[in-house]
Image (cartoon, rainbow, N blue to C red):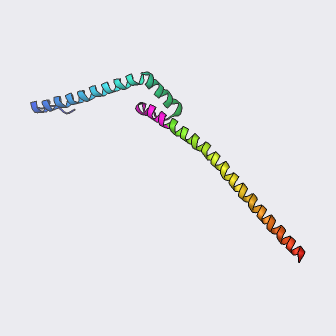
Amino acid sequence: MNKINNRQELRKEIVRLNRLSLEQKNQIKSDLHSIKENLTPSGILSNLVSGFTGIKVNKENFIRDGFVYTVSLLIQQFFLKSEKKFEAGVYGIIDKLIDKLRSAVNNFSSHEARKRERD
């Protein structure tokens, strides 16, 4: 802090100190509000989840994110089951095609073998 030499400097210093005081009061109010929010049940739950997972949980988005995650998980499970059914169907079709191809090759080769035997 500099030495105040005249009335104008004194007024400027008073304005600066009043501004600083207002900023500090607002910071204290903000800190108290944050403490109150952390002591609510939802704040405690948010802090617990953050502590266990190590991920900072935004309380305002906690329910929305949980809902989105749940829907995403359900959709993934649905597609996983659908994928398994589709995969089983494709394998069944491919197995049938391979059996028909083997049968055709066997018929063709046995037909050729009979033809050679006749000649």
What residue do we see at 78% from left, 65% from top?
105
In the rendered image, the vertical position of residue 99 relative to residue 41, given as above or below: below
For residue 77, what is the image quadrant? top right
Please check the rendered image and state whether residue 66 is part of the magenta-colored stretch, yes or no: yes
Where residue 13 appears, as percent x and y from the top left, is: 17, 31
The C terminus lies in which quarter of the figure? bottom right
User: What span is in magenta?
Assistant: 55-68
Q: Is residue 11 left or right of residue 85?
A: left
In the picture shown, does residue 23 fall above or below 97? above
Foreground residue, 21 or 75?
Answer: 75
Q: Residue at x 65, y 49 (%)?
A: 87
Q: Quadrant of residue 27?
A: top left
State the residue at coordinates (16%, 28%). 14
Q: How many marks?
A: 0
Left or right of 40 on screen, residue 53: right
Measured as percent of width and height from the top left, residue 40 is found at: 42, 21
Task: Report x, y in % for residue 80.
Answer: 60, 43
Quarter occupied by the N terminus: top left
Q: Main secondary structure of the magenta part?
A: helix
Residue drawn at (17%, 30%) of the image: 15
